Image (tube, coloured by chain):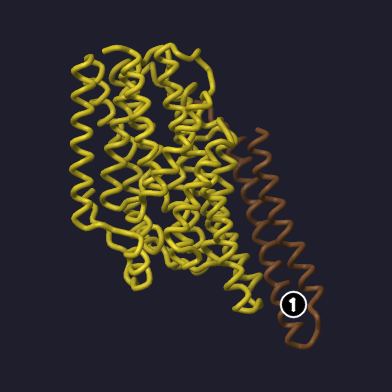
Amino acid sequence: MKVDWMALGAVFAVSTGVVLGLVVLFSVGLRGMSAREDAREGGGNGVSGTVVAGVSFAACAAVVLFGLYLVVAG
Amino acid sequence: MDASLLVIIVVITALAFDFTNGFHDTANAMATSIATGALRPRTAVALSAVLNLVGAFLSVEVAKTISGGIVDDAKITPAIVFGGLIGAIMWNLVTWYVGLPSSSSHALFGGLIGATWVSSGADAVHFTKVVDKVLVPAIAAPLVAGIVALLATFLTYRLTRRARPSVSDRGFKVGQVASAALMSVAHGTNDAQKTMGIITLTLITAGTLSPGSGPPTWVILSAGIAIALGTYLGGWRITQTLGKGLTTIEAPQGFAAQTSAATVIMASSHLGFALSTTHVASGGIMGSGLGRQRDGVRWGVAGRMAMAWLFTLPAAGIVGALAGLLAGQGTFGVVLVSVLAITMAVVIWLLSRREPVRPEHVVDEIAAQSEPHKLDVAA
């Protein structure tokens, strides 16, 4: 009875890393959006918030696309 | 019976199975988005169907696991594959009727293993491979998805606690749609491939393909289309159970649960693990329920689902074994099995028409529902 524990472990490790990374990036993006709206209400322009949000969401998309690429390139 | 005619029958049956699989699994990808109102049911299902099709083209690892691994292709015939498929379809229809998200994949494996075992002997089943590529992932994958979703949900709530409610509300709905889309793609990469594997296996046993071949393009295309059609046309019934039955879902949870499930499925597909998308999605939803609050899961409903899962392999195996034996008797057997299967499918369909569940109803019931969804399951 041979079970490929390495492969299972890889699934666990990769999934944990990728998902937590995505969740953190996405949450940071949302905080950026919030900061931007706060700044605008306070009379500022909210550029830093916009940049943070933009970079975070772009990073999310990049992670997903890279993952898909890995599967397709298989 | 003429071998090529039998192959055609098996291919059509396999595609029918794929269709019922889509029917079952719309819920996996879209339940949480529909439940939180991030997507309208019709849009959700159409989107899911298209992405299923896309996913079907991404990978063939799981198809290879099925066509080249779990049973000995030298010892079985198209008739046995046919019997196994019938077993799987019957179990799928019954669980669909009672609204239970059981695993189409395990029904398929159960049917195939049962039919092979009874008709060709236990040594025609590669049990080591079954354990390594099917049974162990069957237990591990939902757990992994659950743990990851739990952590992800916890982190999400923690990190966005101080974000503006208006922003996070809108943001998570968008995030949820994106993660549901990913889930649909993942679903295509794992489930559509199982049908490809079965058709490829049939072609190998009939001598049309050489042992060890991957699925031909027409097989990939037709399997992708069949599952997409099934996804588009069905699934309202089970969406109820998954959407609100297991746990009460908020948009951030839906986002975390889907992202976790989709990632686990994609990673597993990539390594050829033929796992149940249903189980993984349920694991993710439960994990996210726990991540939000400690008593966030309705263990009663979860327990009944687990019971149905336990029964799936043996139940589909027994039906598959009987159907395989009958079909192995020649033309008369194949015709008899087909007629029986069609009759039963029609009966179940007629029964389900008595209390039809349509998209509009799903929305109404989800909105109004404060009690756990009841499951009328005898088993």
Q: Nearer the viewer, residue B201 or B335?
A: B335
Expressed as whole percent of the image width and height from the top left, the position of residue B70 reads 45, 24
The hue used for chain B is yellow
What residue occupies the far bottom of the structure in this picture?
Answer: A42
* Residue B113 left/right relative to A29: left
Image quadrant assignment for residue B238 = bottom left
Looking at the image, how many numbered discs can be counted on the residues? Answer: 1
Image quadrant assignment for residue B338 = top left
Classify mark 1: residues with Cα within 10 Å, few (<14), some (14-19) or many (20+).
many
Expressed as whole percent of the image width and height from the top left, the position of residue B255 reads 56, 61
Q: Is residue B13 above or below residue B141?
A: above
Image quadrant assignment for residue B367 = bottom left
Residue at 53% in and 17% down: B212
Expressed as whole percent of the image width and height from the top left, the position of residue B148 reads 57, 54
- Residue type at mark 1: give it: Arg
Q: Nearer the viewer, residue B374 or B338?
A: B338
The hue used for chain A is brown
- Which SS class for mark 1? helix
Residue at 58% in and 34% down: B59
| Subunit ID for the residue under disc 1 | A
Q: Is residue B30 above or below residue A41?
A: above
Q: Residue at label 1?
A: A36
Residue at 45% in and 52% down: B28
* Residue B113 left/right relative to B38: left
Q: Is residue B61 above or below residue B287?
A: above
For the N terminus of chain B, which image quadrant?
Answer: top left
Expressed as whole percent of the image width and height from the top left, the position of residue B115 reads 31, 24
* Residue B161 left/right relative to B76: right
